[in-house]
Image (tube, rainbow, N blue to C red):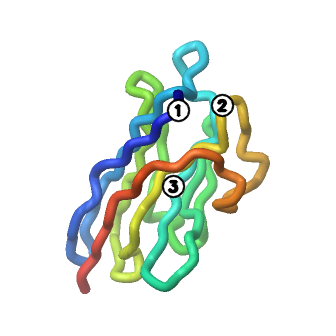
Amino acid sequence: QVHLVESGGGSVQAGGSLTLSCVASGYTQSSNINSCMGWFRQAPGKEREGVARIDSDGTKTYVDSVKGRFTISLDNTKNTLNLQMNSLKAEDTAMYYCAARGFGWACLGSMVPSSFKDWGQGTQVTVSS
């Protein structure tokens, strides 16, 4: 059974940092997460957008607005997907979601929400200016 549970959201001032974590179950093969994993966010009144994704081979991709500030990583020892967010800006305020394309699925260049099969419940990030 697949399951994604996010944590780590909160309120921070602009310029600050937060680390989001997502414990993933149901995607492990040979002790490694075998799925394209991604972080998405949705601000009030806006569409959900891809923030970063990581493939099972470690390839990482970021949306331009977070390049150089956010780092996505996989900790296969803990079945956890992380998002280190530095130099946060007010425009980073949103609900952040962890998502998986599905067991055995590579990213194949996609960071479109509709191509990700499984989702966590979300964790709120609020950045005050």
Residue 103's label in the rendered image is 2
Task: For mark 2, give the secondary structure.
Answer: loop
Tell me how far mark 2 sits from mark 3, CA to CA: 17 Å
Q: Quadrant of the C terminus?
A: bottom left
Find out whether the residues at labels 1 and 2 contact each other: C-beta distance under 8 Å.
Answer: yes
Q: Amino acid at mark 2?
A: Phe
Q: Nearer the viewer, mark 3 or mark 1?
A: 1
Is the residue marked by circle 3 packed among few (<14), some (14-19), or many (20+) residues within 10 Å?
many
Location of residue 81 (image quadrant): top left
Q: Amino acid at mark 1?
A: Val
Q: Amino acid at mark 3?
A: Trp
Q: Nearer the viewer, mark 2 or mark 3?
A: 2
Q: Earlier in the sequence, mark 1 or mark 2?
A: 1
Q: Position of residue 28 (x, y in %)?
A: 55, 22
Q: Residue at x 43, y 64 (%)?
A: 69
**Residue highlighted by disc 1:** 2
Is the residue marked by circle 1 packed among few (<14), some (14-19), or many (20+) residues within 10 Å?
few
Q: Residue at x 64, y 35 (%)?
A: 35
Q: Residue at x 56, y 70 (%)?
A: 48
Residue 105 lies left or right of residue 79; in this view the side is right
